[in-house]
Image: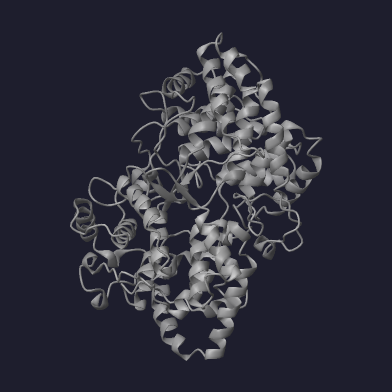
Amino acid sequence: MITSLVQDARTEEPLDQAIAAAERALLRRQEPDGHWVFELEADATIPAEYILLLHYLDERDPALEEKLCVYLRRVQNPDGGWPLFYRGESDVSTTVKAYYALKLAGEPVDAPHMRAARERVLALGGAARCNVFTRIALALFGQVPWRAVPAMPVEIVLLPRWFPFHLDKVSYWSRTVVTPLLVLIALHPRARNPRRVGIGELFVRPPERERGYMRAATSSALGKAFLALDTVVRFGERFVPAFVRTRAIATAMKFTLDRLNGEDGLGAIFPAMANALMALDALGYAKDEPHRALAKRAVEKLLVIGADEAYCQPCTSPIWDTSLMIHALLEAGDPEVAEPVRRANDWLVGRQILNVVGDWAVQRPQLRPGGWAFQYWNDYYPDVDDTAVVAMGLHREDPRKHREALARAAEWVIGMQSGHGGWGAFDAENEHFYLNNIPFADHGALLDPATEDVSARCVGMLLQMGYVKDDPIVAKGLDYLRRTQQPDGSWFGRWGTNYVYGTWSVLNAFLAAGETSRNSATVRRAADYLLRSQQADGGWGEDGATYWAERRGLCKESTASQTAWALLGLLNAGDGANPAVARGIAYLLEHQNGEGLWDEPWYTAVGFPRVFYLRYHGYRAFFPLFALARYRNLVERKEPLPPLGF
């Protein structure tokens, strides 16, 4: 198969050669069972936290720590700090954790990179200015007093659902991270810290004398009111009867153990896994106790270990990677990809969640499961976005063969629509926005509200599967998308950076609805936005800082993935003949590397805007292939616009 692609490429034009080269590179990466998985990289926080976890448990691994340190030193900014994303400004919380991890691992404090890091932390206000999660980590190591942490009594797990704060009212990631964390906050355990390493030098004032830890999460009146309430709750905790606290800890741990999720871990995300492991340790679970051993293996499976350096992923992304790869290969349309696509879709069908009723059922108790997770397994937390993209790939390959899987997927996605017409990623109606004002929520990502990108995928899926524009579910979804269009014609990108991603995502849905720039003012405005955003080199790029309003439009460099999104958006809008599209295609052709893929150090995705950014290593691979192939189909081969939602 790959040999055939090599032979065909000898007589092909540059566009065909580029497509064939990308296909060859990607087909070589397919796993034996049919799936693809690429590395998923976050900022320095996760590998730093991995080192902290080893020292918390006193389970050091000097060889691994040295490789993690090599990675941390490599991603350090020239000013001494560590950024949230490639070439971003230094962030005080990320820098404190990276510095502490390096010091724990034995880095000499008088080394130039350590001195530079200290100076950067102090210039940013000192370690007392760190965010809540960093202050909790420092409290566990005895570096700050527990009063530096907002009041989060473990008894909140016992509150009734009608109460203003309840874990069912926050997002899945908050729920899984916070529940074992509540146990840690209640028990106040102390890290083993075998070398007794501290970071008092990172504070402007001695930590025990600092009075500026507690800050309102927002500047609103509600934020200030919640800050005042924090003092009341903190005072009241001392009167909680011991038996109530014991019951609350047991309830929190039952939640945790019920969702431990085998070697894929609690919530299948690193912070939740690490908190679960530390909570088990704090409660006295021995290292070889099955639950604790399982939790440790789950964390270890996130490591990416190379010859010289290593880092820890925040999670894995095999279902997302595989489903996106399927779309790129199907768009290329070469006969040789039929068998790899079939094997990939068969693998995905085997991962559909049909029998586990997850946390989403709190809002949708009568709904049958039928979605897919993001990771290998995460049955309690299927992802609406993944489900829509997987379903569109199954439908595109063979709707009759996959009829049963598609029917269950459509049923679940329809049932997850929120009342206003949009879809969130993991929960429905998860929009208790007042909770973003509590002191604990200073990261601004406590909730899982509907977003334009996820909603567009759901609308596109339903339309591709045969639902009509006038169907009430689809009509509400399209209306939501029209309402959320920005004045400049773009859409916000919640899960990808940023307006280019959001705009491309929504244009997919309008393509499936039969709306192009020729018959829709909405689409015309969106296409014009993309045209205005093109860079002088022909590509598109958008920096992670664009999630701050004052930095909107910032581009440091064009990227392959963002260029591909913009091209796909313009092609789907019916603007394929615009010279800007040809310039964008030229950008991709000129920047293809010797492997047949594209180099991209930039972070073009987000976990939480302004807080946690992601670099999908697969985005530089399958999205450019997808764009080149669609351009060949629509412009060079003059095929009609496909009635697809992706």
Q: Residue at x 81, y 44 (%)?
A: 404
Q: In the depicted view, which residue is nearer to us: 232 or 340?
A: 340
Q: In this orientation, does residue 462 appear? A: no
Q: In the depicted view, which residue is nearer to us: 252 or 156?
A: 252
Q: Quadrant of the N terminus?
A: top right
- Residue 507 placement, left or right of 223: right
Q: In this orientation, does residue 389 appear? A: yes
In the image, residue 435 lies at what x, y percent?
Answer: 49, 67
Q: Residue at x 47, y 25 (%)?
A: 595
The total number of labels drawn is 0
Q: Residue at x 70, y 35 (%)?
A: 343
In which quarter of the view is residue 520 placed?
top right
In the image, residue 124 lies at what x, y percent?
Answer: 24, 58
Relative vertical location of residue 538 with respect to residue 66 in this rendering, above or below: above
Q: In the depicted view, which residue is nearer to us: 257 or 331?
A: 257
- Residue 554 placement, left or right of 357: left
